Image (spheres, rainbow, N blue to C red):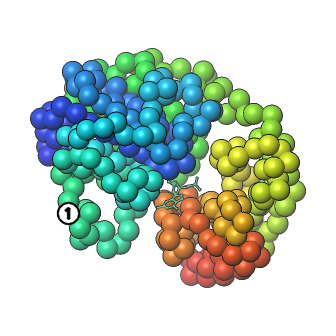
Amino acid sequence: MKISSKLLNLIKQNKSFLIVGHINPEADSIGSSLALSLGLRKMGKKDICVLSRDPVPETLSFLPLSKTVRQKPPAGEFDVVFIVDCNEVSRTGFEGFRAKKMAVIDHHVLPSNSKTSEFYRSLSASLIDPDAAAAGLLVYRVLTALRVTIDKNIATNLYTAILTDTGGFRYSNASAESLQTAACLVEAGARPWDISKEVYESIPFKSMKLLGLSLATLERKDGIAWINATKHMFDKTETTSEDCEDFVDFPRKIKDTEVAVFFRQDGGHTYKLSLRSKGRVDVQKIARSFGGGGHVAAAGCKVTGTLKEVQDKVFRAVRKAIKES
Ligand code: 5GP
Ligand code: MN
């Protein structure tokens, strides 16, 4: 997908940039935001702030410049705010931004009516490509179009973003472009084993204990496999929601699973769901019907009720989707 000259000019012609990802950020949100900020700095832009409502997870503190991420915007107005790795202001966790112009760089599926929405029309530019494996790939496209030389810090942020959003280059989104870009990033200084060690081989002990408790809840029926994590489990293992980032991968790994679901108790009667599809079912549609969103194969939402009520509602929707697939 060609990058619009509108987007490139927006960067070239402005001086101050606020870059914001989504709530509960993971490596793509943080990595692509940091890489964009580093690239803009290389172009001589000095007034840049990377913003995240929620703190950078401890497991991502190895990302170069991660310490510069701020949780509150500085005073004053920016020329441009970039919304990265999401496509709604609400997903950033902020109500709005003090910026003259707004742009989006994202790879999530847009809500069906969004192209005509006021928000979408208000954007000065956008790069939205749901076929892109990661927002990091889009930032790479933008920086190379701007002829920014990719250095080790940019490469490490982008490689981590692409690595994690493709599940270690295993998912259906692991395109030729994602592998070719990864190779360029390695040439530019990203070190695959150092990054893999941080991402996949540094799980906190307490998280593994939580995984043990959560896996003990494993059940399956009608092509759906699921696990949950309750507040009691978090308390017992002294963990938080940060500790169960990839738990949904386990029910998905099971043979004959079509859809995997992870139920994470967020409050008394609120559950954060992670939905994963093996390929036949569009879980983004299911998540959206509960007010969430995401990708065809990976999506999330929040549902209120007791665990039993939430599961009944969700499984009804998933069973219907499997039947219609
Ligand atoms: P996860 O299950 O890992 O939280 O999220 C899977 C994918 O769905 C990610 O791309 C994430 O950004 C997206 N996602 C998760 N929860 C929500 C939500 O509540 N709303 C929207 N729009 N997307 C979500
Ligand atoms: Mn992403």
Q: Looking at the picture, tell me which residue is in the foreground, 21 or 216.
A: 21
Q: Residues within 10 Å of mark 1 (few under 14, many from 20)?
A: few
Task: Provide the residue designation for mark 1.
Answer: 121
In the image, residue 321 above or below residue 6: below
Horizontal and vertical percent position of residue 195 = 58, 26
Going by the numbered disc 1, the residue's amino acid type is Arg
At x 71%, y 29%, the residue is 202
Q: Looking at the picture, tell me which residue is in the foreground, 177 or 319.
A: 319
**Residue 86 at least partly seen:** no
- The verdict on label 1 being within 8 Å of ligand 1 is no
- Secondary-structure class at tag 1: helix
**Residue 302 at least partly seen:** yes
Q: Looking at the picture, tell me which residue is in the foreground, 25 or 3.
A: 25
At x 21%, y 21%, the residue is 44
Q: Quadrant of residue 15?
A: top left
Q: Quadrant of residue 230?
A: bottom right
Horizontal and vertical percent position of residue 7 = 19, 44
